[in-house]
Image (spheres, helix red, strand yellow):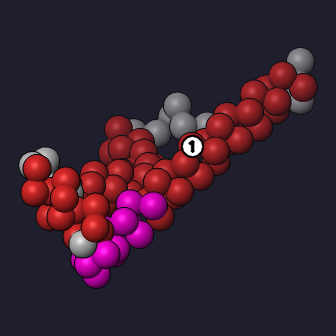
Amino acid sequence: MMLNLPIKQLLKFIWNTSGIYIIWIIIHWFTLQLYQQYCAPFTFWGLLFGTAIASQMPHCRGAIWIIYQSSIAISQMWIILGSWIVTQLIQITFWKKD
């Protein structure tokens, strides 16, 4: 198992298994910040301009696509993690050697 690994190998294992999740989180957060700043500013003009015109601009449509895809990827990663945990629990419970 992982208990006998040195710290460096353990950190490498953690990065290899969770690195892509962290990258998706950063992409999602960064794109949300850009969308809020450039496509839907928190002003009266942003309310009028953002709903009708800015949301159809190419960079805003691209940001919406990235936000949508990253949220799907993050949700699917949670499903994979949950499935892995259930698999591990089933193996421990039913196939444990006495």
Any part of residue 85 in sight = yes
Magenta stretch, residue numbers: 56-68
Q: Main secondary structure of the magenta part?
A: helix
Magenta run includes residue 26:
no
User: Is 26 displayed left or right of 66 in the figure?
Assistant: left
Residue in view at x 22 percent, y 70 percent: 54
Is 13 located above or below residue 6 in the figure? below
Residue kind at label 1, given as amino acid type: Trp
- Which residue sits at x=76%, y=37%? 87
| Vertical side of 60 occupied by 91: above or below | above
Q: Secondary structure at mark 1?
A: helix
The reply to whether residue 12 is in sight is no
- Counting from the top left corner in percent of width and height, residue 61 is at 34, 74
Q: Which residue is mark 1?
A: 78
Residue 52, x across and y down, in percent = 28, 67
- Residue drawn where x is 28% and y is 61% of the image: 51
Outermost residue, bottom side:
58
Left or right of 77: which side holds 92? right
